[in-house]
């Protein structure tokens, strides 16, 4: 039995257009969902994982599969449907799963033979068995998985060509920010994989550099932090010789022992969602956790960096409180915080989130012809109507923010600081130059968007 597991590309995502900027190679990451599905698949299936981000193959020349599984974030949905149509025309059954299939079930049911909602661990073997017997059901629900059931991902199945390997150690997030799909999809209960499983899986990864995909590697409560420390101790003891980056909330900075153990275990960088320079913005987004009174964010960032860990800050533009000038403000605040890199995204109503419900009820979703418009839901296009920022203004604000933060003098100042403090100056330089290189690409993409779709914002 031959199984293709496919990660569709999104042609509009400039950060994955590898050829347009040579730095973009560092931005293509492995589709872990498909490697996990492969890990759940019994040996009688011959599996090929196809990652279209490395280039779409010529499907007609490939051997005919018995089953096709397609994953998709919302932004990949259109391409996913094209691929599904191709295989269904050949009479090959197509199963879709992942975040978009879960949040937009009816849309996906109309375009695939079968849909798996939720996490796949508890249900995928059943789906395969039904497919083998030719009796696929239209719908399966995996719910939330037991973390003991998460298999080792099949890291061996994806060829080289990636700068980073990928692993997951926890799922779920209790914070439920209004714009984020994680709590809706993975639940509010923070679930942790058994530490020996994580260490063993790290050993199976070929790449020296690894992305830990957890939404919050350390969690929010004392018992979460204690588990994170145990994990880091076990990783250091196993002498993995890996360097990794992860996502965390700013409370990562609050525990020196935690930071020391993380660095010893190989942590070299952390993405932190600051989201907005204004406390009222945090209230608007429902991210009260960042509102700790009296926190000196610059000092928190410095404390992390002293352990030779790079800090990338993430912000969102387009909140109801944001007014013209927000671009410069974000660049200035991020520089004051002293972050090593900056990622700014447009506030985007993703299906299944509280923000989606709010914007939909207020008639503020401008790009709402689905499924065609999903390709713009990459957080790099302003798809909604923003309270104080017209389409033209918000695009200008984004460009000025990135130009300011990634100006050559500022990049050199940051890289010099990295060099001085022994914090991976080369990675910092590559990251910053990659972001700088993408300003032009993203600006052009937004200008095209405005020309072609601008009337939809009226
Ligand atoms: C790592 C990550 C990335 C990485 C790597 C992506 C990749 N190729 O895997 C990078 C940085 C590239 C990335 C990019 C983006 N991401 Co991202 N990302 C994540 C993150 C943090 C983890 C994903 C992951 O690997 N999970 C681990 C695997 C094992 O879990 P899983 O994917 O859910 O898969 C399980 C189930 O869903 C199911 N399943 C999945 N696929 C399939 C398929 C079949 C057939 C079946 C049966 C089951 C099944 O089975 C799996 C095992 O249980 C998630 C948050 C999250 N917790 O999921 C956000 C997340 C998926 N990203 C998100 C977004 C918005 C994006 C971007 C559009 C924007 C951005 N700048 O962040 C881009 C777009 C990329 C594109 N190509 O269009 C949103 C997606 C929301 C949505 N409705 O689409 C999420 C949920 C975060 C959020 N804040 O809401 N991302
Ligand atoms: S943005 Fe981060 S903290 Fe907020 S719900 Fe999503 S994963 Fe949790």
Image (cartoon, rainbow, N blue to C red):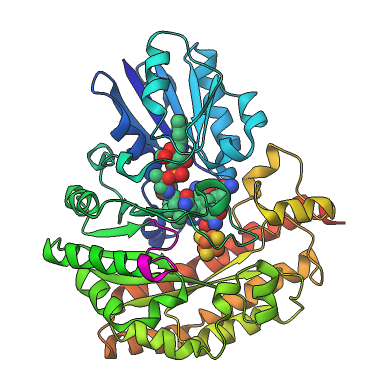
Residue 12 seen in the figure: no
Toward the front, the furthest residue is 223
Task: Give how far across and how far down residue 412 sits, in percent.
Answer: 40, 86
Q: Depth check: give the residue in front, 281 or 164.
A: 281
Residue at the location (38% across, 20% down)?
Answer: 128
Residue 183 point in image, percent of width and height = 55, 53
Quarter placement of the N terminus:
top left
Magenta stretch holds residue 217: yes
With respect to residue 458, does 413 lie above or below? below
Q: Is residue 222 magenta?
A: yes
Residue 241's spot in the image, x, y percent? Answer: 15, 63
Query: Is 447 left or right of 30, judged from the image as shown?
Result: right
Is 58 placed left or right of 307 in the picture? right
For the record, the magenta segment spans 213-224
Q: Horizontal placement of 451 versus 37: left or right?
A: right
| Residue, far right | 458
- Residue 224 visible, this angle: yes
Tally the numbered discs.
Answer: 0
Instruction: Give the quarter of the figure containing the C terminus.
Output: bottom right
Does 309 appear above or below 446? below
């Amino acid at each position: 039995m031959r199984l293709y597991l496919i990660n569709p590309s999104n042609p509009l995502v400039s950060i994955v257009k590898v050829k347009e900027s040579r730095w973009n190679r560092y931005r293509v990451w492995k589709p872990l969902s498909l490697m996990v599905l492969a890990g759940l698949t019994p040996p009688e299936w011959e599996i090929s994982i196809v990652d279209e981000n490395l280039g779409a193959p010529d499907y007609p020349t490939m051997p005919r599969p018995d089953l096709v599984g397609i994953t998709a974030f919302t932004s990949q949905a259109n391409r996913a449907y094209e691929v599904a149509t191709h295989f269904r025309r050949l009479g090959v059954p197509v199963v879709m799963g992942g975040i978009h299939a879960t949040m937009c079930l009816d849309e996906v049911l109309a375009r695939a033979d079968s849909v798996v909602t939720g996490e796949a661990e508890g249900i995928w073997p059943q789906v395969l068995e039904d497919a083998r017997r030719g009796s696929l059901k239209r719908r399966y629900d995996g719910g939330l998985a037991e973390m003991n059931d998460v298999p080792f991902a099949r890291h061996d199945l994806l060829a080289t060509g990636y700068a980073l390997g990928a692993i997951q150690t926890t799922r779920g997030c209790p914070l439920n920010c209004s714009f984020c799909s994680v709590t809706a999809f993975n639940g509010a209960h923070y679930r942790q994989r058994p530490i020996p499983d994580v260490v063993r899986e790290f050993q199976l990864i070929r790449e020296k550099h690894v992305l830990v995909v957890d939404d919050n590697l350390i969690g929010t409560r004392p018992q979460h932090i204690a588990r994170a420390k145990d994990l880091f101790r076990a990783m250091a003891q196993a002498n993995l010789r890996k360097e990794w980056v992860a996502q965390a909330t700013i409370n990562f900075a609050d525990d020196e022992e935690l930071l020391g153990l993380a660095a010893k275990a190989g942590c070299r960088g952390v993405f932190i969602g600051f989201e907005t320079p204004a406390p009222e913005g945090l209230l608007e987004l429902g991210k009260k956790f960042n509102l700790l009174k009296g926190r000196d964010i610059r000092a928190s960032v410095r404390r992390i960096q002293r352990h030779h860990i790079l800090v990338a800050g993430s912000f969102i533009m387009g909140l109801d409180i944001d007014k013209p000038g927000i671009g410069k403000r974000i660049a200035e605040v991020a520089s004051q915080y002293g972050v090593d890199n900056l990622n700014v995204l447009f506030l985007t109503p993703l299906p299944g989130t509280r923000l989606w419900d709010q914007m939909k009820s207020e008639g503020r979703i401008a790009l709402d012809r689905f499924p065609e418009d999903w390709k713009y839901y990459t957080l790099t296009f302003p798809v909604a109507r923003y309270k104080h920022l017209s389409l033209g203004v918000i695009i200008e604000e984004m460009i000025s923010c990135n130009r300011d933060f990634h100006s050559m003098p500022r990049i050199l100042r940051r890289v010099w600081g990295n060099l001085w403090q022994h914090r991976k100056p080369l990675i910092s330089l590559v990251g910053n130059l990659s972001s700088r290189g993408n300003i032009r690409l993203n600006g052009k993409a937004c200008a095209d968007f405005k020309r072609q779709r601008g009337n939809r914002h009226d």
